[in-house]
């Protein structure tokens, strides 16, 4: 019963590339003219050649910006973490980056994956498919690693379709990883949506990106969870 | 100089909500509300270069004490800033200094058009706030290696250097010195994605900026100035 339900779910979430653009590895095309996306990717590939991270953070601007604030040095540097976040990235961009060298020289014990909010034009099912394609890729390239998928946060000052979409993504991913021993979904939303349904700029300064205060609220439980995972990996 | 009707970079334009969560308008609405509640001595307006500054310690250390407001919105062009200034973000306030930092996102426009858009912003500020001094920050270099956008931003700065002094109460400040190394590269220590500044990058630009702001604030006659350095 459980396995049958799993198979139909896999079809539903479309983690195979051909029919799902969110699950088809795609580099970012340089429209602006300064080649920054590819530069960053190349930096990540070469950076990884002399590092031995225990934890790899990969994703979009929510990952990238985390690296700029004190909270990174406080909580994640001590865990020997590397940060491969790129602002604007969608699931298919992260999939391309990880398929093209960013995992080639490292063996982290845990990969923290935070991506999906920028997949505009994709359905929740497609985005989930994209995330699951990344989870599968990580398993293929790093058989011993554990993948911790972070739930996509709510966004916008007041209720809107993107909040619904992101909540649906989280629900679908939760179902998809529930039977996997090497991956899980962690909800890191500490309660950003207030009782009047609004989100505060003190937590998300533009109703999408986290303030340092917002990061503290997200990262304290994340850090505790990571430490637990690392200890368990060490025992295995 | 800027031929407003023919310069698309000088045409006020709101950002359309394509993504679906209306974040640009929410931020604008919040800024209009802040104008009702606050009495800033310094107003910062622009794109993510302005917006991100408020998230680092340096804002609280150096700029909050000057009673500064931050009206930066990521990805804004000169057109978007013009629209915001015309639609409430200058109401009820009388800052002594307005710092303008915008232009690097004007991808559809030529260097001359971008400079014209920035000039239009400065003109709007001096006409709406006759007592304010306007400080326009130069556009920074971007990208790890030399590229067309660096050349474009240098050209914008060139136009601004010539045009702005002709406008009263307005000056140009280049805060980009030192970011491009002798081998032509920019370091991620200064710009974590070769565009946006790190804490260290903001520290570097804050020094000449704060010096200028203090100088202007000192020069400005004042009835009460509580907590300045």
Image (cartoon, coloured by chain):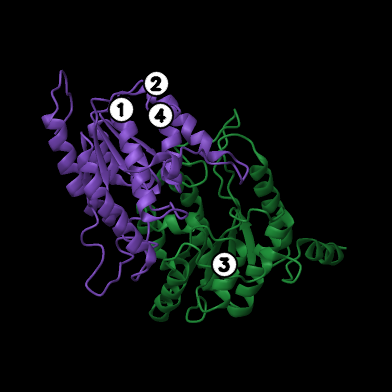
Task: Specify the label residue A164 is tagged with.
Answer: none
**Left or right placement of residue B54 versus residue A153 in this view:** left
Chain A rendered in what hue? green
Task: Give the label, 1 or 4, closer to the camera.
Answer: 1
Query: Tags 3 and 2 in contact by the CB under 8 Å rule?
Result: no
**Element carrying mark 1:** helix
**Horizontal and vertical percent position of residue A96:** 58, 72
Q: Quadrant of residue B20?
A: top right
**Element carrying mark 2:** helix
Task: Specify the label residue A94 is tagged with.
Answer: 3
Question: In this view of the protein, which residue sits in the foreground, A93 or A114?
Answer: A93
Task: Give the label, 4 or 3, closer to the camera.
Answer: 4
**Horizontal and vertical percent position of residue A86:** 48, 62
**Inter-mark Cα distance, 3 to 2:** 43 Å
Chain identifier for the purple-coloured part of the image: B
State the residue position of label 4.
B89
Q: Earlier in the sequence, mark 2 or mark 4?
A: 2
Query: Tags 2 and 4 in contact by the CB under 8 Å rule?
Result: no
**Horizontal and vertical percent position of residue A24:** 67, 70
Q: Earlier in the sequence, mark 1 or mark 4?
A: 4
Task: Give the label, 2 or 4, closer to the camera.
Answer: 4
Query: Tags 4 and 3 in contact by the CB under 8 Å rule?
Result: no
Q: Earlier in the sequence, mark 1 or mark 2?
A: 2
Disc 1: CA contacts within 10 A as few (<14), some (14-19) or many (>=20): few
State the residue position of label 2.
B36
Task: Give the label, 3 or 2, closer to the camera.
Answer: 2
Q: Is residue A236 visible?
A: no
Query: Tags 1 and 3 in contact by the CB under 8 Å rule?
Result: no
**Left or right placement of residue B90 versus residue B162 in this view:** right
């Amino acid at each position: 019963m459980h396995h049958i339900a799993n198979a139909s779910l896999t079809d539903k979430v479309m983690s195979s590339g051909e029919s799902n653009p969110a699950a088809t590895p795609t580099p970012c095309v340089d429209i602006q003219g300064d080649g920054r996306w590819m530069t960053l990717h190349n930096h990540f590939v070469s950076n990884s050649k002399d590092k031995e991270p225990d934890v790899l953070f990969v994703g979009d601007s929510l990952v990238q910006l985390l690296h700029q604030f004190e909270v990174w040095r406080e909580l994640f540097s001590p865990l020997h973490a590397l940060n491969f976040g790129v602002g604007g990235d969608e699931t298919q961009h992260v999939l391309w980056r990880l398929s093209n060298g960013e995992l080639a020289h490292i063996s982290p014990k845990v990969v923290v994956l935070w991506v999906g909010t920028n997949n505009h034009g994709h359905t929740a099912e497609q985005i989930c498919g994209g995330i699951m394609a990344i989870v599968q890729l990580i398993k293929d390239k790093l058989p011993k690693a554990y993948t911790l998928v972070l739930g996509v946060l709510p966004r916008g000052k007041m209720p809107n379709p993107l909040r619904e979409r992101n909540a649906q993504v989280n629900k679908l991913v939760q179902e998809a990883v529930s039977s996997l021993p090497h991956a899980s979904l962690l909800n890191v939303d500490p309660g950003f949506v207030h009782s009047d349904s609004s989100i505060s700029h003190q937590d998300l300064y533009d109703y999408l990106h986290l303030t340092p205060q917002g990061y503290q609220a997200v990262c304290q439980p994340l850090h505790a969870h990571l430490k637990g995972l690392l200890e368990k990996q060490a025992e295995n | 100089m800027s031929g407003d009707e023919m310069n698309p970079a000088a045409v006020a334009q709101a950002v359309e909500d394509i993504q679906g969560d209306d974040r640009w308008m929410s931020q604008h609405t919040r800024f209009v509300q802040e104008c009702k509640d606050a009495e800033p001595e310094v107003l910062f307006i622009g794109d993510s270069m302005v917006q991100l500054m408020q998230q680092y310690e340096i804002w609280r250390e150096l700029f909050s004490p000057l009673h500064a407001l931050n009206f930066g919105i990521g990805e804004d062009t000169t057109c978007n800033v013009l629209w915001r200034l015309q639609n409430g973000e200058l109401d009820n306030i009388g800052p002594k200094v307005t710092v303008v930092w915008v232009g690097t996102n004007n991808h559809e426009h030529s260097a001359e058009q971008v400079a014209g858009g920035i000039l239009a912003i400065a003109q709007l500020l001096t006409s709406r706030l006759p007592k304010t001094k306007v400080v326009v920050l130069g556009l920074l270099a971007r990208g790890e290696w030399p590229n067309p956008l660096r050349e474009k931003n240098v050209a914008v700065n060139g136009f601004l250097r010539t045009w702005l002094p002709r406008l009263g109460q307005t000056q140009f400040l280049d805060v980009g010195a030192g970011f491009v190394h002798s081998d032509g590269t920019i370091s991620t220590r200064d710009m974590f994605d070769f565009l946006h500044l790190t804490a260290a990058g903001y520290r570097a630009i804050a020094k000449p900026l704060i010096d200028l702001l203090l100088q202007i604030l000192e020069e400005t006659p004042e009835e009460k100035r509580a907590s300045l350095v």
